[in-house]
Image (cartoon, rainbow, N blue to C red):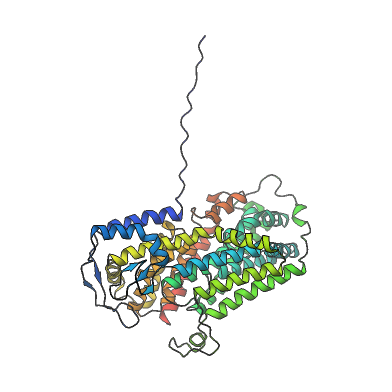
Amino acid sequence: MTTQTTEQPPARRKFTFPSALTVLAVVTIGVWLLAFLIPSGQYDRNGDGAPVEGTYHRVPSGQSFVDRLNDLFLSPVNGLYGIQDPKTSLVGPDNSGDLYGSAGVFLFVLAIGAFITVVFATGALDRGIGRLAHRLRDRGALLIAGVMVVFSVLGTVEGFAEETLGFYGLIVPLMLALGYDRMTAVGAIILGAGIGVLCSTVNPFATGVASSAADISLGDGIALRFVMWVVLTGVTVAYVIRYARRVRKNPGRSISGFLPGDRETSDAARTEVPELTGLHKAVLVVTALVFAFMIFSVVPWASALTGDADATPYGFELDWSFPQLAALFLCAAVLVGLVARLGEQKLSSTIIQGAADFISPALVILLARGVTVIMNNSKITDTVLHAIEGVVEGTSSAIFAIIIFVVNLPLAFLIPSTSGHATLAMPILAPLADFAGVSRAVVVTAWQAASGWMNLWVPTTAVTIGGVALAKVGYDKYLRFVWPLLALLFLLICAFVALGAAFT
């Protein structure tokens, strides 16, 4: 008797897109190798250190192979606290001069991570959104609008995105109980938070990092971004409500379809959510005041109110930057913990855990900054800038802004981290604005719009893939649902950045 065994074919490994840290590690090595091939050169600089158009010329890098190897080895260190020598412009950890590394932004990300984690540890934000959804449970359109606007506000001020994954268990049953489908819940959550991030006004992980890399204030360009946020949020909310009403009127037009039991009213969806306690209300008030004060502290009020970029600052302007904001959010984390009576042990451990949870985007920032150090020390940054200058030369300011938006779309796909993308691209893209006679804030707005637009649909983001998985909706069906909105947003973004460039 013989026994036949059937060999199972080896399981194919499913491709997963590498993390931002891995992508930037590959980019670091790639740029280091390219620096051997790209000619070194530089622009003359004006009094503010900005390159002067038309002054590019070739210069020797003056680096040996050992020097270049040392730059590669020290790139993460230089990305954190590299010092730029004012005479040679070289960056190194032992130099004397100005800080070139991203230590300020690095600490700021850890501080706001600690603050956000403490706020979530109190349960106030989760319960607040839960109460809003429960109160509006019998008013479908108002529920969709309310959830989306809240998520959009959180997205525009603090990059609320991954945190939305915890709300599918609440929002999906509510939408089904009201006669909508699962796609309505997906649209309300992903698009609500995503449109806020796309139109970030003071989002520290997008606008903040990009503004720092572009060497401008976090408040520069906030008026354009605010108007853009109002319009695009309104358009997105209307799009989701229109789809939801269509499905409620004719369930056969649902793109996602219905799973067994979806058409039955869920009693769980109408379960009373616990009331907000006095402590929860106090935490929400403190959180709102902290973000309001952050906005007040970074906005150049004289320039914003007069329209003159060189206006003399008002006496009440604080002109805060990342060091002060890092201290603000650390103090605010402690204040929220005290208000919520977390206790010393829990507050301390939560702050540490929050900083640890945000170490990944912080590391991405310093790795990306390390790439710019390699380019700076090998003197190829200005060569790359000169090449791009030739592409946009002669274009109008409006066309220039649209080109910046379009150019950043593939970069946003290749570098899914907004912080890493901003730190890597801004040192090259921001000076182009000077050549085109456009405000650097417009470049920041165009960049973050590109990053936000891509993150509404690309499969490399946990928010999108995780969201459709939690809602049990096919990714292909989500693309069918969202592509008309993406096309409309694309046109509106181009119009906004073009107008912003034309009037700056």
In the image shown, does 333 or 269 lie closer to the viewer?
333
Q: Quadrant of residue 93?
A: bottom left
Residue 198, visible in the rendered structure: no
Residue at 74% over, 68% down: 279
Residue at horizontal 65 percent and vertical 48 percent from the top? 258
Count of numbered badges drawn on the protein: 0
List x then y, in percent, for residue 127: 71, 62
- Drawn side of residue 175 relative to residue 73, left or right: right
Q: Toward the viewer: 352 or 478?
A: 352
Among all residues in the image, which is located at the extreme top?
1
Q: Position of residue 164 (x, y in %)?
A: 61, 59
Q: Quadrant of the C terminus?
A: bottom left
Q: Which of the two residues, 503 or 39, is positioned nearer the viewer here?
A: 39
Left or right of 63 on screen, residue 184? right
Name above or below for residue 497 compared with residue 266. Answer: below
45 is higher (above) or lower (below) than 268: below
Report the front residue among 411 and 420.
Answer: 420
212 with respect to 241 (left or right): left
* Residue 55 shows in the view: yes
Q: Is residue 10 above or below residue 353?
A: above
Image location of residue 149, percent across then percent down:
63, 68
Residue located 49% across and 64% down the image: 452
Q: Residue at x 69, y 44 (%)?
A: 260
Quarter of the image for residue 115 reads bottom right
x then y, percent, for residue 221: 48, 78
